[in-house]
Image (cartoon, rainbow, N blue to C red):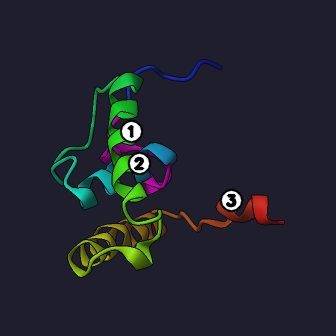
Amino acid sequence: MNKPSIYVGLDKDIQGGMTTIGKIIRDAWVFGVLPETQTCEGWNLAGIDSVLQKVNAEWDKYGCLVSRLPPELAERHQRIHGAAIEKARELGWCGEHELEDDK
């Protein structure tokens, strides 16, 4: 099965957007790399990768730890990711598959 070359958009993503690309987009919102209205619908993977590079550079400033974010970014992270988790759970996502590597 071929992977699609165009992203469907965060609001249309599977698992309520709890995918790798969905997390990249939400982190981009946290750091102001993208406006919170940008779902990246119709973007190619090169565009998503460009956002990933910018997001990684921002995370590197804080040792890739939420606990090291300044208060404004920590609050934004909690608001954005908290709302996404709540919505995904309403759609049936539970996150158990993300723990498979820990077993």
Mark 3 belongs to which amino acid? Answer: His
* Residue at the spot 29% in from the left edge and 51% down from the top edge: 28
- In this figure, which residue is indicated by the disc labeled 3? 97
**Residue 37 in magenta stretch:** no
Tell me the crowding category of disc 2: few under 14, some 14 to 19, or many 20 or more residues within 10 angstroms, Cα based.
some
Q: How many marks?
A: 3
Tell me the crowding category of disc 1: few under 14, some 14 to 19, or many 20 or more residues within 10 angstroms, Cα based.
few
User: Do residues under tags 2 and 1 come within 8 Å of each other at their CB atoms?
Assistant: yes
- In this figure, which residue is indicated by the disc labeled 1? 53
Mark 1 belongs to which amino acid? Answer: Gln
Q: Magenta region: which residues?
A: 8-19
Tell me the crowding category of disc 3: few under 14, some 14 to 19, or many 20 or more residues within 10 angstroms, Cα based.
few
Element under disc 1: helix
* Residue at the spot 50% in from the left edge and 47% down from the top edge: 20
Mark 2 belongs to which amino acid? Answer: Asn
How far, Cα to Cα, is label 2 from label 3? 24 Å
Whether residue 56 is situated above or below residue 42 in the rendered picture: below
Instruction: Pinpoint residue 35: horizontal percent, then vertical percent.
Output: 15, 50
- In this figure, which residue is indicated by the disc labeled 2? 56
Instruction: Pinpoint residue 99: horizontal percent, then vertical percent.
Output: 71, 65
Element under disc 2: helix
The C terminus lies in quadrant: bottom right
Element under disc 3: helix
Q: Is residue 90 left or right of residue 75?
A: right
Instruction: Pinpoint residue 13: horizontal percent, then vertical percent.
Output: 41, 44
Of discs 2 and 3, which sits in the foreground?
2
